[in-house]
Amino acid sequence: MDSFFDQFDEFDKALSEMPEVLQFFFGGNFYDFVAGNIYQAIGIGGLGWLIATLYERRHNRQMGEREALLSDIKLSTTKNIGKNAASGVMICGSVVVAHDFFRTLIIQFRKIIGGNIKAYERLVVRGRREALIRLREDARLRGFDRVVNIRYGSSRITGMFITAIEMVAYGTGIKDHPKTENSPKS
């Protein structure tokens, strides 16, 4: 049975027998291979973080545009439906939002150390905002004028290297009576 260090020697031998092109990428021995891969891992992680940050910013910008288009749907957390309500139905908006691998790794390290996890906070805020936008979109599709008694629910979805949340925003969609000239103004 080979010892642990004999396996490194076999790996060094295999690396030395590689074509020169592959030796350039992997280095000449095991230690060069490890050092080269560390730099590659940091580079790939940094590139992943950059791409994920750009996607997150784009998503936030798109949510802002969608919110502006839905500003006519009024929202309230109170249970009061008002005097002008004609009908009401429960509606909801749901979303699952996840972080990229690099941020998930940072979150895992932060869990070990403890303290405030800002990356997870941003994930929750994005999820809540997107769920509320989807609630408003559902209200518009069903022809409601406003949504009252809005509440949030959430669940965490975790695995080995996944940090995701499901956010649900729900409330009662209210369709108001059409205003006529004889009806009192409120």
Image (cartoon, rainbow, N blue to C red):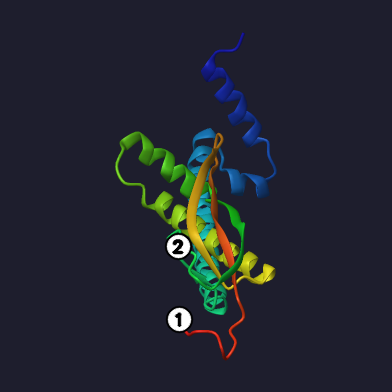
Residue 28 place in picture, x, y as percent: 56, 40
The correct choice, above or below, for 94 with respect to 180 in the image is: above
| Residue found 54% across the figure and 85% down from its top | 183
The one nearer the camera, 74 or 56, is 74
| Residue found 42% across the figure and 45% down from its top | 106
Please name the amino acid that badge 1 sits on.
Answer: Ser
The one nearer the camera, 50 or 10, is 50
Residue for badge 1: 186
Q: Secondary structure at mark 2?
A: loop
Which residue reaches farthest left?
A: 115
Residue 46 visible in the current orientation: no
Residue for badge 2: 80
The one nearer the camera, 50 or 137, is 137
The disc, 2 or 1, on the residue closer to the chain's N-terminal end is: 2
Residue 109 visible in the current orientation: yes
The correct choice, above or below, for 62 with respect to 155 in the image is: below
Residue 50 place in picture, x, y as percent: 50, 61
The correct choice, above or below, for 155 with respect to 127 in the image is: above
